[in-house]
Image (cartoon, rainbow, N blue to C red):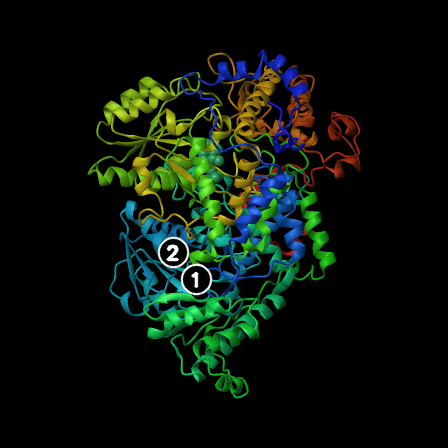
Amino acid sequence: MTTLWPQPTESFSARHIGPRSSEIDAMLQVVGASSLDSLIDRTVPEAILDRGDHGVGAALTEGQALARLRGMAERNHVLTSMIGQGYYDTVLPAVIQRNILENPAWYTAYTPYQPEISQGRLEALLNFQTLVADLSGLDIANASLLDEATACAEAMALARRVCKAKSERFFVDADTHPQTLAVLQTRAEPLGWEIVVGNPWTDLEGQEVFGALFSYPGSSGEVRDPRAVIEALHAKGAIAAVTSDPLALVMLESPGALGADIAVGSMQRFGVPMGAGGPHAGFMATRDAYKRHLPGRLVGVSKDSAGNPAYRLALQTREQHIRREKATSNICTAQVLLAVIASMYAVYHGPEGLRAIAQRTHRMASILAAGLRVLAVKVETESFFDTITVYAGASAALVLERARAVGINLRDAGEGRLGLSCDETTEAETIRAVWRCFCPDEARLASLEAGLSVTEVLPASMQRSAALLTHPVFHAHRSETDLLRYMRALSDKDLALDRTMIPLGSCTMKLNATSEMIPITWPEFARIHPFAPAEQREGYAELFAYLEDALCKISGYDAVSLQPNSGAQGEYAGLLAIRGYHRARGDEARDICLIPASAHGTNPASAQMVGMRVVVVACDTDGNVDVDDLKAKLAQHDGRVAAIMITYPSTHGVFEERVVEICALVHDAGGQVYLDGANLNAQVGLARPGKYGADVSHFNLHKTFCIPHGGGGPGMGPIGVGAHLAPYLPGACDVAVSAAPYGSASILPISTAYIMMMGDAGLRHATEIAILNANYITARLAEHYPVLYRGKNGFTAHECIIDLRPLKDACGVTVDDIAKRLIDHGFHAPTVSFPVAGTFMIEPTESENKAELDRFCDAMIAIRKEIAAVESGDVAIEESALRHAPHTVADMAGPWERAYTREEGCFPNGVDTSKYWSPVGRLDNAWGDRNLVCSCPDISEYS
Ligand SMILES: *Cc1c(COP(=O)(O)O)cnc(C)c1O
């Protein structure tokens, strides 16, 4: 059909998808399929294949999608926020915004599991840990958690783990943010812990508890001295956790100095926009004695093969979810990019700058309170940093109304109380406007400032005693030129998607398109408080509705919750929904979660967090769920099975033929099916989990739906559910898994833009090419390395596992040798040793073109030749370029006494001036764990 008007000349999907059509034909030949359709027919089981359109519509161009998002943004209204309650306006320095938040060298990086190619972000994270440990006055801090509320829940779990007392009760300061309380209640209930809410200064005595959480300052703004109460807690062997505000801690005595064992909070106001709730870096610090119980990731200092200091993830095998059902936390994706931004904010301002910001904020709040008192307003808060609570009684609604009319949001704290928070951006005009809202009498206001006496409200005993941020990094980069060069020097050390493909199986490192990223820094998305009045967030409401609807259509589910901040949090929320469903039906005995041996570690970790018992289901030799074993386990635990958690396609990289049967078997036994959606990139447009038998899935928006990994976060893990589970979603009942109702709302435009710009046809085509690309790699590498698992027609799904164990057995070459040698070729290694130890899991995604796939295959084949030389005995493994990899610039200078030439070592592809150089040699992990240093080392250590 011809139409009058020409179609747009631009198609985004042709930019998102790597291979051109001529390349697709060539690749199909290599994999042995006559067409894409035929490849898909022979890969995706017939029982689930459904090529019908989702109904998300035709593709928009980049310009059209941005215009649509602009329209949504315009329905959000940015007011001056004085709501506080854990979220404050802040100034993100432009140099950090453009060169980190908007810079793919930072935002497209992966979690630093390969330390040699991650030295830049590891250094930034070490700065973050140093900042947190210093503000907290504690020994050791991790490299971020998901938000303040979940950090408090993690603190509670840590307390239960390290406390020797038998109690199952945890005390929570009544003056805690309500969203934190909700998350704590959700976390405690399935584990059988009782939350006791009260005033620690009066109600804690005589209570048997395993720990207590203090809010410092409180949600009301009040700053109280917890020293005596903490001492009393310690006397009965209980643990003291303090949730705090990092800007307040610049001025206030540190939690560590007050006796706390754990300090938590959110680093949001260190330069990270409120973003309607996130993403922000939660933080946690604790005593050295508890370091092995810290959830999340911990960066530490070690040395490389030349003996030089180098960074890596410390105690890596202790990342909690790797402990599977013995884990106390399921956190995997955290908030690295936001932690990096917060750390740079501290590097940019230094201790003097931070102190000036904190003092100015405090002064604003003090003036605000003093003025209100003169105006006879009842200010209830006596000792405060930046927030006061006033009692306005019957006139509270009127004051709120007047404030809104002049562009200011106050917090409605209920029962006639209003909360007023100052921040870095507060101006004198704002304070004057607030006074006017309480007292519209111009004559009184006119004379108010002249006679105002403002006294310090923080007692000396509550002011910080220790020096702040003494390490040179917080003093050395005060000019913008300097900071720019520091950030550039760090990012130059790292390999991110802007330089090479990152073929990490299960992680789906695909294009994060620039157009998708643009809206996230628009003020109408960035500067919205999550609890601002709904009429100011209509644009967000439209965005959420669009995305929920699109995710339902794509997945075949009936309802979606956008609350979970990561895939693992989605698992947790989904299992809570299953638990709620069973309990509502009186099916309380169902407490077993079946999990195949191949599952990701977060699956069993999440199951234990909801109080379920994990029973492992075996896999057969082809990598599929062993259906006979499943039947046996269902029979053995008749009436007790709450759920099965399966990953589809499985982490073995195949579409299991019997998935429909597996779902039916579990349903027949009265259980629910949790389908881990991390591998949805192999299904979009071709199969819908909600239609072929699953009840609930999470979608890693930072995998399939293009949110960049940010070096280990942010992410989003919304869940889709069948209608029967919808009443048990966060928001629909009193379950809360994140501090903010829509999790990390401000990054949802990324996935929304992606879906809009791909449309039905583009989304389906992306999946087809993801499968083709994986099979192309499989076909090219199969002659050189054994491919562990394949589907019934010999094809893999969107990823493949190659088995390197035989090489280790034959000649001692390890997975690490191969991973590090890939660095010399300029590649980030694939996923190492997951889900099978001694293997690589390779996932190219649809965004890589044939040339890049070939470059990778060629590197793997060249490495195989080097291995052959070791196998044949020509080269000893210890003497080989494999074992000495990665090579550094230092290898180009000085004496050379290796069994291979410098050129062979440093330039495996011939001399190449644009080659990536690893900044350090191979890391010594064991040494670093024995000599644990997790904050910025003393400068003398570098000499
Ligand atoms: C990535 C992944 C998860 C966890 O997701 P996070 O967002 O990192 O919490 C769970 N299961 C599988 C199979 C994954 O690949």
Q: Which residue is mark 1?
A: 85
Quadrant that contains the N terminus: top right
Residue 243 marker: none
The three-letter code of the residue at mark 2 reads: Gln
Q: Which residue is mark 2?
A: 179
Q: Nearer the viewer, residue 524 or 339?
A: 524
- Picture quadrant of residue 862: top right
- Label 1 CA crowd tier, 10 Å (few <14, some 14–19, many 20+): many
Q: Does residue 579 appear anywhere in the picture? A: yes
Q: Going from the N terminus, do you reach mark 1 or mark 2 first? A: 1
Q: Nearer the viewer, residue 581 or 638?
A: 581
Answer left or right for 903 relative to 575. Answer: right
Q: Residue at x 64, y 38 (%)?
A: 496
Q: Position of residue 775 (x, y in %)?
A: 57, 19
Q: Residue at x 57, y 22 (%)?
A: 774
Q: Position of residue 783 (x, y in %)?
A: 61, 13
Q: Nearer the viewer, residue 836 or 436?
A: 436
Residue lying farthest to the left in this orientation: 586
